[in-house]
Amino acid sequence: MNKLEFNTLVIQQADSLKTYARNFTRDQDDANDLVQDTLLKAVTYFKNFKDGTNLKGWLYTIMKNTFINNYRRVVKTNSFITKEEEITSANLVVSATSNVGENKFVMEDINQALSSLSEDYYVPFTMYFEGYKYHEISEYLNIPIGTVKTRIHVARKAMKKTLNAYKFGY
């Protein structure tokens, strides 16, 4: 069979392909697009068709695979695209890039607030912040745990007052 004969046979199947496509898409325009994609693939891959093969079945297989691949592509694309209703102010804060200059000023303010603490409060607070447990700080400084907890609490309150402009939630 030559290419012209093949193309003629493929075009003759267009009506039954449209009916089959509507089963997949449930929409006339999408069905027409699917038929067009199927016909294009059939004509493009004419050399893959073997004489004696059921042409209608071959075209249906192309259509089914085209529909599945398009569906997967749409699902994958939609999983990466953020919809407008998903963009709340809370999500914008998470996705926004921060300003390095702003971070520098914040860190300077935090360091200044830390340096304003007396050593009695600075050492337990920084040790706790670095991950030491109350009992470890107590042993290191040789003071009671209750004193450690009080000093950390007082240091937090002082830091919160000094850094009030940032509204940290201690």
Image: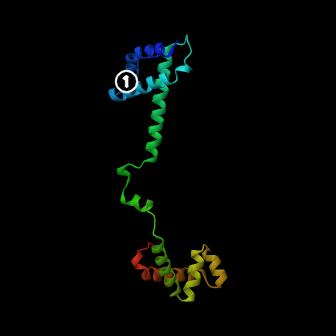
Name the residue type under label 1: Arg
Q: Which residue is mark 1?
A: 22
Q: Is residue 11 visible?
A: yes
Q: Is residue 80 above or below residue 109?
A: above
Report x, y in % for residue 152.
Answer: 53, 80
Identify the residue shown where x is 44% and y is 38%: 74
Report x, y in % for residue 126.
Answer: 57, 79
Dot 1: element: helix
Hey, which residue is sitting farthest bottom in the picture?
Answer: 118
Closest to the observer, 106 or 28: 28
Q: Is residue 170 visible?
A: no
Q: Is residue 151 above or below residue 129?
A: below
Q: Residues within 10 Å of mark 1 (few under 14, many from 20)?
A: some
Identify the residue shown where x is 44% and y is 59%: 95
Q: Is residue 28 above or below residue 167?
A: above
Residue 160, located in which quarter of the rendered image? bottom left
Closest to the observer, 147 or 29: 29
Residue 136, located in which quarter of the rendered image? bottom right
Report x, y in % for residue 158.
Answer: 46, 83
Identify the residue shown where x is 41% and y is 50%: 82
